Every structure is written in structure tokens, then in C-alpha cells.
């Protein structure tokens, strides 16, 4: 079973917001369910509507990204709209803490209209399809005037059974400190809300802006399929790499 809007409404968003504030990510266990996750993976890989881009061609790793069009298929479109509604208040609070004047509207369609007016029309939500020795390098999707500070990743195959390796890795750079790496444990059907590029960090005297990137470590065996839902679109560009900011 895949989650309904009612499922999202019943999540403990106070606890989720607290973890996002402290860690920059929050795991939503078994959000898609095992059977639902496998079905979604099969349907996506069988679709002719997804645009396949090689990670090697982007100098971003090995494997493939399969991009959805601007009109996401179900249930991803509903996931995206329902999750945005819950995350917009957190995003607005983060902007306020960082002294940023922009406030995200309550409705995803209205926010995407703001994107279009700013020239952001390139859809970013996609599946990642990684086989043995494939990986996704550290990066962030922060292209454009309107960048939503949160995104959602989900795992559609089972670690330890369908693949080994392939961990979701986050790095966070705090002021005057070394980058802090974190491995986020995901199981089949789990999702995680992660910071897109920046988030506030409460210091002893002020809120600081910290920089974040994420990656998928090398798949040692098998086949790893995941999904990444972005709430903002990127600037339209001939080269997909323009949508990424890589770790250098």
C-alpha cells in the first residue's frame, strides 16, 4: 500500500520538525510499504515517459537518473503536493531564522508558479537506478531564485537482499568546522526528508547558515532503485549538470 493524504496528516510533524532542526533530516519508516515500493519501482522502470540521463555524462558518478516530466505520475504527484503542504511551514520558519524575506505559499501549485515566473521550468524529481559499482557523488540541487530547502528521498529496493552498499550519505558544513558526514539508514519502502542545500543551525549567540550535500555510496552488488522528489524546478538549461552544485 502507498500512503494517502490522511497518512501524511497523521504523522508526528512536531517530532519531524524537531529532528529536521537538529539533524537536517528525518526518516519516515515504511512510508510506501515493501510491496508498494517494489511495485512503484517496477512501474517506473517499465515507463517510456521517463527521461534517462547517465550520471557519467554529468560527471556525477555512475548509473542512471530517470527524470519524471513536470506532470508527475501518481502516486508521486500526490506525495509531492501533500508533503509540500506539511513542509512549507518548516521552510518558512527556516527562512525567518536566516533572515530571508521570501515566504513559501501554502500550496505547491502556487509555489511552482513562482518558479515559472523566475524562469525555473526544468523538473528535477527522478528515480536513481544504480547497479554494481555505481554511485551518486556529493551534490545539492540549489539552482534558481526559489529553492525549497527540503526534499524527499525514498528507497524502492531492499538493502542486504536486492543490493549491498548504496547508503544515503549526507554531509554538513558548519561555520569554522570540518564537514560532518552522516549515513542515513533506509530500508525498503522508507523515505527521508533531507535539507536541500542550506539550513539554520542555532549557535550560542545566533542562527548560522550551514551547507549540506548528499550522495549515494558505491553499490557493491545488486540493483538499487530510489526516488528523489524535489519541490522546486531548476533553471532551464541545455545541460542537466547546471541543476547541480557538486562537491569540489
Image: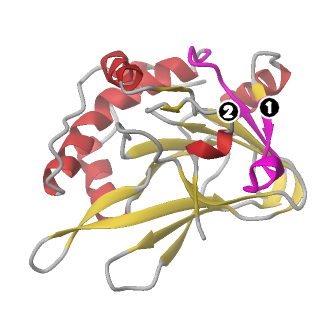
As drawn, 138 above or below 27? below
Residue 62 lies in the magenta stretch: yes
Q: Who's the residue at 20% across and 41% down the image? A: 92
- 169 or 157, which lies in front? 169
Task: From the image, tell me which residue sits under label 2.
Answer: 238
Residue 124 place in picture, x, y as percent = 57, 33
Vertical order, 142 against 108 (above or below) = below
Residue lying at the far front of the rendered structure: 238
In the visual, does 69 lie left or right of 26? right
Q: Percent from the top left, x then y, of residue 32?
A: 59, 33
- Discs 2/1, front: 2
Q: Quadrant of residue 217?
A: bottom right
Q: Few, some or many C-alpha atoms within 10 Å of disc 2 (few <14, some 14-19, many ≥20)?
A: few
Q: What residue appears at the point 51 percent right and 61 percent down from the top-left corner?
A: 213
> Regarding mark 1 in the picture, which secondary structure is present there?
strand
Question: Foreground: 127 or 232?
Answer: 232
Residue 86 included in the magenta stretch of the image: no
Separation of marks 2 and 1 at Cα, in angstroms: 15 Å
User: In which quadrant of the rendered image does the C terminus lie?
Assistant: bottom right
Q: Is residue 103 visible?
A: yes
In the rendered view, does 29 fall on the left or right side of 208?
A: right
The answer to which of marks 2 and 1 sits earlier in the sequence is 1
The residue sitting at 32% across, 49% down in the picture is 16
The residue indicated by pointer 1 is: 52
Q: Which of the 4 image quarters holds residue 209? A: bottom left
Which portion, as a residue range, is magenta? Answer: 52-73
Give the structural element (helix, strand or loop) at label 2: loop
Amino acid at each position: 500500500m502507498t500512503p494517502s493524504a490522511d497518512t501524511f496528516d497523521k504523522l508526528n510533524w512536531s517530532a519531524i520538525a524537531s529532528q529536521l532542526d537538529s539533524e537536517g533530516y528525518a526518516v519516515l519508516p515504511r512510508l510506501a510499504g515493501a510491496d508498494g515500493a517494489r511495485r512503484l519501482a517496477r512501474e517506473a522502470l517499465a515507463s517510456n515517459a521517463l527521461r534517462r540521463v547517465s550520471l557519467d555524462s554529468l560527471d556525477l558518478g555512475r548509473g542512471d537518473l530517470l527524470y519524471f516530466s513536470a506532470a508527475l505520475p501518481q502516486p508521486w504527484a500526490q506525495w509531492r503536493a501533500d508533503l509540500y503542504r506539511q513542509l512549507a511551514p518548516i521552510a518558512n520558519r527556516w527562512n525567518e531564522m536566516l533572515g530571508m524575506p521570501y515566504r513559501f505559499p501554502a500550496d505547491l501549485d502556487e509555489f511552482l508558479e513562482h518558479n515559472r515566473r523566475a524562469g525555473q521550468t526544468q523538473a528535477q524529481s527522478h528515480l536513481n537506478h544504480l547497479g554494481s559499482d555505481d554511485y551518486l557523488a556529493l551534490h545539492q540541487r540549489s539552482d534558481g531564485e526559489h529553492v525549497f530547502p527540503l526534499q524527499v528521498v525514498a528507497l524502492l529496493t531492499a538493502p542486504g537482499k536486492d543490493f549491498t552498499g548504496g547508503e544515503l550519505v549526507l554531509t554538513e558544513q558548519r561555520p569554522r568546522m570540518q564537514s560532518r558526514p552522516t549515513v542515513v539508514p533506509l530500508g525498503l519502502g522508507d523515505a527521508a526528508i533531507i535539507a536541500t542545500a542550506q539550513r539554520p543551525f542555532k549557535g550560542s549567540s545566533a542562527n548560522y547558515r550551514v551547507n549540506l550535500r548528499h550522495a549515494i555510496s558505491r553499490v557493491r552488488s545488486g540493483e538499487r532503485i530510489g526516488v528523489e522528489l524535489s519541490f522546486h524546478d531548476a533553471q532551464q538549461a541545455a545541460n542537466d549538470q547546471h541543476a547541480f552544485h557538486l562537491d569540489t
